[in-house]
Image (cartoon, grey):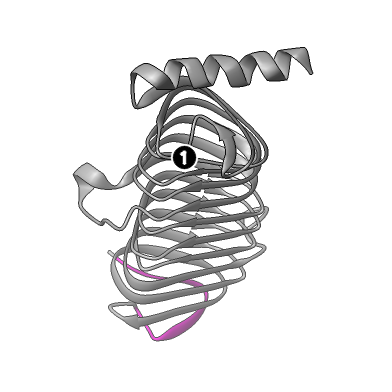
Amino acid sequence: MKKLVAAFVLAAAGAVFADTTPVMVSLVTPVQAPSSDYNVAGIRLSLVYGQSRDFKGLDLGIANRSTGDFTGVGIGGANIADGILYGGHLGLVNWNGNKSREWATVSKGGQIGLVNYADSFCGLQDGVINVTDGLFTGLQSALLNVTEDLYGCQCGFYVFLGANIANGSVRGCQLGLVNYAEEMEKGIQIGIINIISRGGWAPVLPIVNGRF
């Protein structure tokens, strides 16, 4: 308890002089020190739920949220970054709403958890369900992988167990029981059922479908 009180005092003291604090401790926002209007450059402990603006450093807790950009490592039950993610989130649920498909502002790093979501992402999504609303570049590995445009690989559990869905264009590969691509620019599907609406060798093929 003394250590927890000391952390609160330290965080509050640092916040007096700047809008960035090296330490943030939260019970449930707004019961936290300093307030959620501050940036963090250091470490945050969220006992139940903590919120900040931009975050840089190590984020630990049950539910962690940055309403701005996140740079560093987040470990918790739920990790939420409303802005650009540079680094990694490890938790049951990882959510990133960067609202961008431009390369310079696409999130880059890794999401590892049961459910991973990003507006757009470059790197690794590894979980049971992976969803990217826009452009995904890299590797999605899960029982269900969903994206709009894919530049990279979607892979089901144990390579061939799972479903892969690309509602836009694909440049890369899809490996799973069922694979779907709206358009195949260049790449291959390997699975039991392979569906390509535009650009494939056929609309539906078993075992292999693609375009080179």
Residue 140: image location, x then y, percent: 50, 53
Q: Extreme right residue here?
A: 1
Q: In which quarter of the image is residue 153?
A: bottom left
Please state which amino acid type lies under the numbered disc 1: Ser
| 13 versus 202 height, above or below | above
**What is the crowding at mark 1: few (fewer than 14 residues within 10 Å), some, or many (at least 20)?**
many
Q: In this view, does 166 lie to the left or right of 60?
A: left
Residue 207 within the magenta-colored segment of the rendering: yes
Total count of labels: 1
Q: Which quadrant: the C terminus?
A: bottom left
Q: For the residue labelled by badge 1, is the local secondary structure a helix, a strand or a loop?
A: loop
Q: Quadrant of residue 31?
A: top right
Residue 53: image location, x then y, percent: 39, 39
Residue 48 within the magenta-colored segment of the rendering: no
Residue 99: image location, x then y, percent: 30, 58
Q: Of helix, strand and loop, which mostly describes the magenta segment? A: strand
- Magenta extent: 201-211
Identify the residue shown where x is 33% and y is 21%: 18
Foreground: 163 or 127? 127
| 91 versus 146 height, above or below | above
Q: Mark 1 points at which residue?
A: 36
Q: Quadrant of residue 70?
A: top left
Foreground: 49 or 1? 1
Residue 122: image location, x then y, percent: 36, 45
Q: Is residue 182 left or right of residue 105?
A: right
